[in-house]
Image: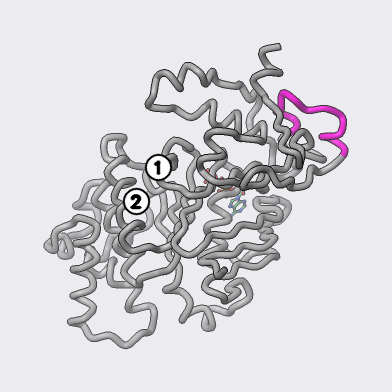
Amino acid sequence: MTYALEIEDLTMHFGPVRAVDGVSLRIPRGGVTALVGESGSGKSTVGRCVVRLLKPTSGTVTIGGVDVTRLTRRQLRPHRSRSSIVFQDPAGSLDPRMLVGDVVGEPLRLSGERISRRDRQQRVDRALGQVGLRQEVARRYPHELSGGQRQRVSIARALISSPSLLIADEPTSALDVSVQASVLNLLADLQRDIGFACLFITHNLSAVEYLADEIAVMYLGQLVETGSREQIFARPAHPYTQALLAAAPVADPVRQRAREPILLGDDLPSALDPPSGCRFRTRCPLAFDKCAAEVPPQVKIGDGEAACHLVGADGTRPDVRERVTK
Ligand SMILES: Nc1ncnc2c1ncn2[C@@H]1O[C@H](COP(=O)(O)OP(=O)(O)OP(=O)(O)O)[C@@H](O)[C@H]1O
């Protein structure tokens, strides 16, 4: 099987800060994987390494069969159009001095591909149409648009070069609640129609319940659990995933009642000095001696994997709630 994205043992250290520490992840062509975890867990850093805004400390990132981690700026150029990123804050990521039409068309110019002015114009118009914006928006400046419209512009810009992979880094969290759903639906529709693969980065699990095929849960620079959306929502194995799910708001009040929040206590420990053994142990209600002494290996469970000493290859899963309520 060929993958749209293969991340192998990715590490990104900023001096002593171990932001990402050995992450491996694969997304099939046209698949959607959500990367979830609290703020500071390293999700954005993974996304930035994938589109090579950052050069990773070690590990590989293979997009469409090419490892992009070691390519020079020049070598990278023909591969740039294979992946794009949409950031959280459209105000900060769009050049305020450029007209919207130029912002959207810029990736075509930067690709070095020979393309006539007229063709570029047509592609810009089409991209704006795809995200539900009228063509006259092209002659406005980003600040003249609403937050939701600006994020649509970012999406048009990201998709204009027909990438096989889109990184969406918290694409709706800076928007008014009233427009979050429409931008999320737009992304879901475009993904379905165009079929690009997507790494959807979010701290909000409920945002991906209808979007993601697979879910990867990140904690303090590492993946603690991966699996299909169905499995992660119905039978989360890792105590951290269980806690995250319990904290996620759900629309259905019956399910909400079944999900009394599990309090995690302290904040995320520092990535400067992560806990020994299992990094989650300092906040885990089920932690025991082994958790401090040994790093838990990834164990296959159902259609995914979890790194917890209480998860068994025979399918045994810990239950944070049971222990808490005992
Ligand atoms: N350029 C940098 N220099 C130093 N430390 C950094 C840098 N970028 C990120 N970090 C640190 O790396 C860790 C992971 O940050 P990252 O932004 O990837 O997390 P995140 O899960 O995406 O959180 P958020 O949702 O808040 O962006 C944090 O401890 C952060 O302070």
Determine the image quadrant of residue 277. Answer: top right
Q: Please, is residue 78 above or below residue 69 in the view?
A: below
Q: Tags 1 and 2 in contact by the CB under 8 Å rule?
A: yes
* Residue 94 x, y percent position in the rendering: 33, 59
Quarter of the figure that contains the C terminus: top right
- Based on the picture, tell me whether residue 193 belongs to the magenta stretch: no
Residue displayed at 61% across by 44% down: 218
**Mark with earlier residue (1, 2):** 2
Magenta stretch encompasses residue 292? yes
Q: Which residues are magenta?
A: 281-293
In the displayed orientation, state which residue is furthest to the front: 314
> How far from the left and from the top, in percent, is residue 239?
67, 31
Q: Which secondary structure, mark 1?
A: loop
Which corner quadrant of the image does residue 69 belong to?
A: bottom right
* Residue 313 versus residue 261 in the image, above or below: below
Q: Is residue 53 visible?
A: no
Position of residue 195 in the picture relative to residue 25 (left or right): left
Q: Name the disc covering residue 188, or none.
A: 2
The circle drawn on residue 210 is: 1
- Secondary structure of the residue carrying tag 2 is helix
